[in-house]
Amino acid sequence: MTLLGHGGVPLVDRTTSTHTTERQISHLKKIEITGRVARECISIAYGFFSPLDGFMTKETVDTVCTKMELPDGTLWPIPIVLDVEADQLTAGGITEGDTVYLTHQERPLAVLEVSDVFQYDTSDMAAAVLGTREERHPGVRMLQAMGDTFLGGTITLVTEPQFQSPFDRFWCPPRQLRQAITEKGWQRVVAHQTRNVPHKGHEWLMKGAWFAANGDLPVEELHTGVLVNCIIGPKKVGDYIDEAILLGHQELQDAGYFRTEVHLVSFALWDMRYAGPREALLHAIIRTNLGCTHHMFGRDHAGVSGFYDPYDAHRIFERIPDGALGIKPIRVLEWWYCPVCGEMTYSGLCAHTDQKESISGTRLRQMIQDRTEPSATLMRPEVFTRTLACADRYGFGSPFCTDRYLADRDPVFTLEEG
């Protein structure tokens, strides 16, 4: 059966069926790529970014920036580009029409058919995609750090990434995830986007979205599932470590707060642009390719303070033409603890808003850093315990990224043979 992805076209697969050795491609020109490009190369090859089968040409970047679509009219909000320095091309004698192999950490990753070599003003790209040119926006800084030249063209993965523990148990690209969904008998799947260890607000966000997505389906047969799709990408000091994010969400299932029949944890490789509403659309596209039918969007989804309204990521879906996106957004407000009701409640439900106890991420992080167990109204005790275990096993004693973690952590994946 043909699996269809975003845009109603067959799900992209740019992986080789047999292992390709360095000797087989050693005659090709080569170029070393950054970690971001390597992660996006993997995502393209496995179909996370369907219908993209390679890195964008200048024409495609132009239409994405100005119209939020690909040249054929398919909805697409953010450029996916391969950046290099011009002197890399000069040194390698690489020009348009060449076939080159891309290396990462000096290991072969993919073959690129170069169809376009171009320059692009990343400040203009930032203004179009992020809505600002201000350097204090992390997405602007990311774009400014790119090389001065771009290569467009299709790619083929020649070395499959070998994911390290604990990531290996959660790596489930689109085709495998579609199979897992079929085996679970899910007719509807609601995606939860996350870069954090879960607190009670996240848990109720997922449970509320599950009820919304399940709709009129009979609940006793459990035809609806929650897909937690963690974002694994570059981190900065103070972020939760990747291992704690994945294992913290898995702990909600292991401890019984979600049944195995309705909950699945996985991840996607993506370097956040913090593009607010446009990034919300890209997340919806990725989860469409994963087989989801619904996607939850909360306050400040993919945003950064001071640049977007807290609910811009809700409103952008009102501008999308019917049929342009094969997934239904579930737009939610805030969950908090109400001491009068004695339970978690949702914006607009109870009349005790003047007494609400919002979940402060800053306060919660400080408690975890101090190894002070939060109250059960903030975080499940099992998640807290698992987070500290991850700190000791993976984070050199801290559940948050430190300079040592960023320098010495085990890699998420390697490109070793076999």
Image (tube, rainbow, N blue to C red):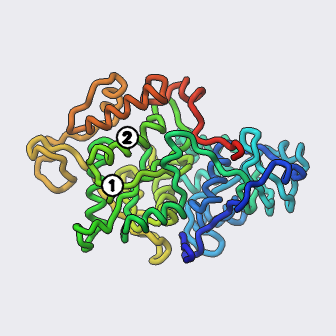
The quadrant of the image that shows the N terminus is bottom right
Image coords of residue 136 (percent x, y)? 53, 38
Image coords of residue 119 (percent x, y)? 76, 53
Q: Is residue 62 visible?
A: no
What amino acid type should be assigned to the residue bearing mark 2? Answer: Gly
Mark 2, residue position: 248
Crowd band around label 2 with a 10 angstrom C-alpha radius: few (<14), some (14–19), many (20+): many
Q: Is residue 38 visible?
A: yes
**Quarter of the rendering containing residue 226:** bottom left
- In percent of the image, x 68 and y 44: which residue is there? 415
The residues tagged by marks 1 and 2 sit, at their Cα atoms, a distance apart of 15 Å
As drawn, which residue projects farthest toward the front?
Answer: 418
Tag 2, which secondary structure?
helix
- In percent of the image, x 25 and y 74: which residue is there? 216
Mark 1, residue position: 260
Image coords of residue 92 (percent x, y)? 88, 46
Tag 1, which secondary structure?
helix
As drawn, which residue projects farthest toward the left?
Answer: 340
Frontmost residue, 103 versus 299: 103
- In percent of the image, x 47 and y 66: which residue is there? 291
Indicate which disc, 1 or 2, sits on the residue closer to the N terminus.
Answer: 2
Image coords of residue 270 (percent x, y)? 55, 49
